[in-house]
Image (tube, helix red, strand yellow):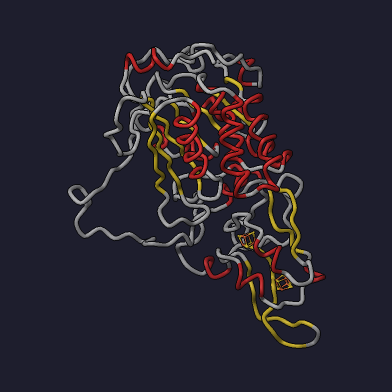
C-alpha cells in the first residue's frame, strides 16, 4: 500500500489498465474482478470491457479497465491506449509489438513468465517503459490448482500498490466462491502466491539471472529498464490498416482461418498424452476436439480396415482437455507439458503439409511464437 490514489488523480483523470492475453487464460474474468474490486473495496469508480474476437481459446484477448475518483463520471469507454499498468498474461505475447503500444515510462508492466526466462524477456523489453515485474503464473496455477487469472490478479494487487491483499481475496470470494465454490480454496492460494511472488526485474546482470529487487514503494522507479528516462511512448512499427488505408485489391491468403496458427501458448501447463496401445479408434476425440489436433488415416485395427488414430498435432492443441474427458478407454490422459517435452505421437497435420501454406512459426494471432514451440521437439516435414 505504498501508492496514494489521491496523488495519482491530482495528475490525471483516470488510472488505466490494459490486459494482454490469450483466450482461455481468464483475462476477461480477471478484468471484471479488478473493475468490481475498485468499486466495492477501493471507493473508486471504474469501467472496463474486454475485446476477444471469436471467443475461441487461443485467440488474442485484450482487457481494459479505468479507475477514477468516486465523484467523477466515467465518460470514456474506449480502449486504454496509454496504460498505467500493462499486464501480459503470457510471455510469448511480448513478441507482438502491438502489445506495447502506447506504453511510456509511466507504464508499469507485469509479465507472466516461466522460470529461467528472465534473460530472454529482458532482451525483448522496449526501452521506455516503467518498472517491469514478473511472476511465474503458470507454475503457481498448477501448484495451487488455480487459474492463471487469479495469480495475475494477486500480482496486480501488489504492483498497483493501493490494493490490500484482503480486498483482492474478498473479490475472489465474491466472484468465484459463488460460481465455483469447490475451486475457491485453490484460487485463493493462487491469488496469494501471485501477490507474494511477483518480483521486479532488474536491468543488472544479476537481475537477468534471476535476482530481483523488492517492489518499489512509489511504483514509479523506472529503474527496471534501461532508457526509462525517455518520456516518449513506445513506438510500434505495426501496420494499422483500416477502411481508409487498406491496400486496394489486396488478398488475405489466411482469411478467417486459424489453420496455420500455433495454439500452444494458450495451454496452461497440461497436454493430452496419447496411449496408442489402449486406443480403439472410436473417433470421439476427433469429433470433440475443437482444433483439428487428431490425425486419422486409413489403416488396420484388429484385422479390419478403418480410420486409425495416428497421433496428435500439438501445434494446434490448446490444452482444453476435452478429449481426455471424452475418451472411453483412457487412451488420452492428462500430463504436464514440462514432463512430456518428447511427445511420442506428435504428428503435424498431414493435409497441411501437402499445401504450400504449411505451418508457419506463428502464434495464435499469427505474429508470435510460443515458448513451448521452442522447447518442444518439433521436426518439420511431417516426420516424428
Ligand atoms: S477417443 Fe480415445 S479411444 Fe477413441 S479414438 Fe480417441 S484416443 Fe482412441
Ligand atoms: S486438449 Fe484435446 S480437445 Fe483440447 S485442443 Fe488439445 S487435443 Fe483438442
Location of residue 374 by image quarter = top right
Picture coordinates of residue 183, whole percent (x, y): 68, 46
Q: Is residue 257 left or right of residue 171?
A: left
Picture coordinates of residue 345, whole percent (x, y): 72, 62
- Regarding ligand 2, which quadrant of the image does it lie in? bottom right
Query: Foreground residue, 285 or 189?
Result: 189
Look at the picture and state if 145 lies above or below 224: below
**What residue is at 37 percent from the left and 22 percent from the top?**
104
Picture coordinates of residue 348, whole percent (x, y): 60, 62
Look at the picture and state if 27 lies above or below 352: above
The quadrant of the rendering that contains the N terminus is top right
Residue 72 visible in image: yes
Query: Foreground residue, 29 or 367?
Result: 29
Look at the picture and state if 209 lies above or below 325: above
Q: Is residue 300 left or right of residue 210?
A: right
Q: Residue furthest bottom?
A: 304
Query: Foreground residue, 116 or 130?
Result: 130
Query: Foreground residue, 258 or 84?
Result: 84
**What residue is at 75 percent from the left and 72 percent from the top?**
328
Look at the picture and state if 295 lies above or below 5: below
Residue 116 visible in image: no
Give the tally of numbered discs: 0
Picture coordinates of residue 117, whole percent (x, y): 62, 31
The quadrant of the rendering that contains the C terminus is bottom right
Amino acid at each position: 500500500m505504498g501508492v496514494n490514489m489521491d496523488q495519482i488523480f491530482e495528475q490525471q483523470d483516470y488510472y488505466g489498465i490494459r490486459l494482454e492475453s490469450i483466450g482461455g487464460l481468464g483475462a476477461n474474468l480477471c478484468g471484471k474482478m479488478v473493475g468490481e474490486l475498485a468499486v466495492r473495496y477501493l471507493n473508486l469508480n471504474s469501467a472496463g470491457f474486454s475485446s476477444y474476437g471469436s471467443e475461441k481459446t487461443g485467440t488474442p484477448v485484450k482487457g481494459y479497465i479505468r479507475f477514477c475518483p468516486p465523484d467523477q463520471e466515467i465518460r470514456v469507454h474506449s480502449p486504454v491506449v496509454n496504460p498505467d499498468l500493462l499486464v501480459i498474461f503470457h510471455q510469448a505475447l511480448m513478441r507482438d509489438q502491438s502489445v506495447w503500444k502506447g506504453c511510456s515510462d509511466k507504464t508499469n508492466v507485469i509479465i507472466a513468465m516461466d522460470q529461467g526466462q528472465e534473460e530472454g524477456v529482458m532482451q525483448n523489453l522496449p526501452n521506455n517503459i516503467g518498472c517491469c515485474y514478473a511472476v511465474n503464473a503458470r507454475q503457481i496455477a498448477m501448484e495451487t490448482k488455480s487459474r492463471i487469472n487469479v495469480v495475475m490478479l494477486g500480482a496486480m494487487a501488489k504492483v498497483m500498490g493501493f490494493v490490500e491483499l484482503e480486498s483482492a481475496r474478498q473479490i475472489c470470494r465474491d466472484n468465484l466462491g459463488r460460481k465455483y465454490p469447490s475451486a475457491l480454496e485453490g484460487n485463493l492460494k493462487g491469488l496469494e502466491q501471485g501477490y507474494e511472488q511477483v518480483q521486479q526485474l532488474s536491468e543488472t546482470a544479476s537481475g537477468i539471472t534471476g535476482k530481483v529487487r523488492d517492489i518499489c514503494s512509489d511504483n514509479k522507479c523506472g529503474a527496471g529498464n534501461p532508457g526509462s528516462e525517455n518520456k516518449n511512448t513506445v513506438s510500434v512499427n505495426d501496420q494499422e490498416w483500416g477502411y481508409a488505408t487498406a491496400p486496394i485489391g489486396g488478398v488475405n491468403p489466411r482469411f478467417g482461418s486459424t489453420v496455420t496458427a500455433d495454439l500452444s501458448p494458450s495451454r496452461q501447463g497440461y497436454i493430452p498424452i496419447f496411449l496408442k496401445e489402449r486406443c480403439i479408434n472410436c473417433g470421439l476425440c476427433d469429433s470433440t476436439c475443437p482444433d483439428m489436433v487428431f490425425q486419422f488415416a486409413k489403416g488396420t485395427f484388429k484385422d479390419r480396415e478403418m480410420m486409425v488414430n495416428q497421433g496428435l498435432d500439438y501445434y494446434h492443441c490448446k490444452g482444453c482437455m476435452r478429449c481426455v474427458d471424452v475418451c472411453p478407454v483412457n487412451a488420452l490422459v492428462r500430463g504436464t507439458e514440462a514432463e512430456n517435452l518428447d511427445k511420442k505421437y506428435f504428428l503435424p497435420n498431414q493435409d497441411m503439409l501437402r499445401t504450400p501454406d504449411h505451418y508457419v512459426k506463428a502464434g495464435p494471432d499469427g505474429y508470435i511464437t510460443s515458448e513451448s514451440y521452442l522447447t518442444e521437439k518439433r521436426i518439420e516435414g511431417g516426420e516424428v
